[in-house]
Image: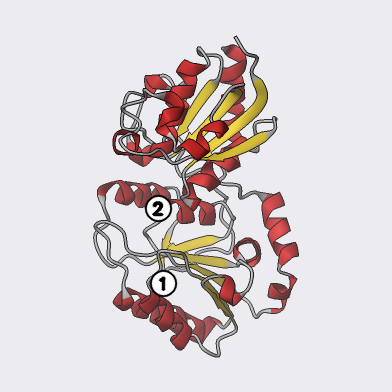
Amino acid sequence: MSPLRNECWAITDAAAGNQRQALALAELMGMPVRHLELEPRAPWSWLAPRFAGGDAFALPADRRAQFAPPWPRLAIGCGRSAALFTRMLRRLSQGRCYTVQILDPRIDPAHWDTVIAPQHDQLSGPNVLVPLGSLNPVDEGWLTDGRDACPGFEELPQPRVGVLLGGSRKQLELGAGYARELATRLLKRREYEGGSLLVLASRRTSPEGLAIFRDMLAGVPGLVWAGPDDGRNPYPGVLGWADRLVVTPDSVNMLSEACAVGCAVHTHVTAPLPDKLARFHRALRERGLLHDIDAVAGTYQPPLRETAAIAAQLRERMSAG
């Protein structure tokens, strides 16, 4: 039996949201971290993580050397594709690799040592940890680094309002009409409170919506950033300097990271949300962490920071095992 590597494998697909969650948790586990971006080939990609046979043959031939012994002491996966490989690792290591899966794997959680699923997934079990939101790296040190990376934002007029734009998803349309209405609301509030607007688009933001923001916010202090053509990504700086944050309602990850900052967080909902997303919004509002876009809220609210506590629970479970 080969020895284990004293390291943590963070296993994800190419999705940025999955990578942020797995890496945020892995970095707190007190061991070297290796990030494996693994995408199974068919038919494993169709059936993951239900069918977990075949081992490394689930990967294209040029990627199989990454998924080979010696196995790690800890593996943290996020997303359906990663769930296939974390499930495999538990068997391949004969149970010696501690396996963690982030997000509901849609099969029995008993296939992993620990499953971490947010409350709105409504998953339960003796090995299930249930944070309110998604895991993320946002803490005081991260925010300080963000401010240091973008010192020019300090000179912008206050309040500095960070605006995080997502995009349409299943059962939720956030097109040009939504973008125009949101920009109008932001400009109307700015008429009486002044300040600046720091707008960050995502890969899912529609080109039409982005064009509307660029047009309507032309001349307003701040920025509209959508990719490398606009310079380096100022996301940590925007969160670090924001006096208030406005987040579109579509992304659990964006809302969770905004709520980790410690300033008021607002959203604009114009249509019924999908059930799981609606449960998440309701939980944030009940905790006083999320407000309507026009609501008056204090400049400070207790930050939602759960990743360090989840890491501590994992260390306890690994020690006990």
Q: Residue furthest front?
A: 61
> Is 233 positioned to the left or the right of 127 in the image?
right
Identity, as a three-letter code, of the amino acid under mark 2: Arg
Mark 1 and mark 2 lie on one chain; the one further toward the N terminus is 2
Quadrant location, the N terminus: top right
Dot 1 falls on a residue whose secondary structure is loop
Q: Is residue 131 above or below residue 18?
A: above
Q: From where the camera sits, is residue 75 visible? A: yes
Q: Is residue 146 above or below residue 112?
A: below
Numbered circle sitting on residue 294 = 1
Image coordinates for residue 134, horizontal then vertical, percent: 47, 44
Quadrant location, the C terminus: top right
The residue singled out by tag 2 in the image is 285
> Is 235 positioned to the left or the right of 134 in the image?
right
Q: Is residue 313 above or below residue 138?
A: above
Dot 2 falls on a residue whose secondary structure is helix
Image coordinates for residue 112, horizontal then vertical, percent: 44, 22
Q: In 3D space, how far apart are the residues under numbered discs 1 and 2 (Cα atoms)?
A: 14 Å
Identity, as a three-letter code, of the amino acid under mark 1: Asp
Depth check: give the residue in front, 282 or 307: 307
> Is 236 positioned to the left or the right of 294 in the image?
right
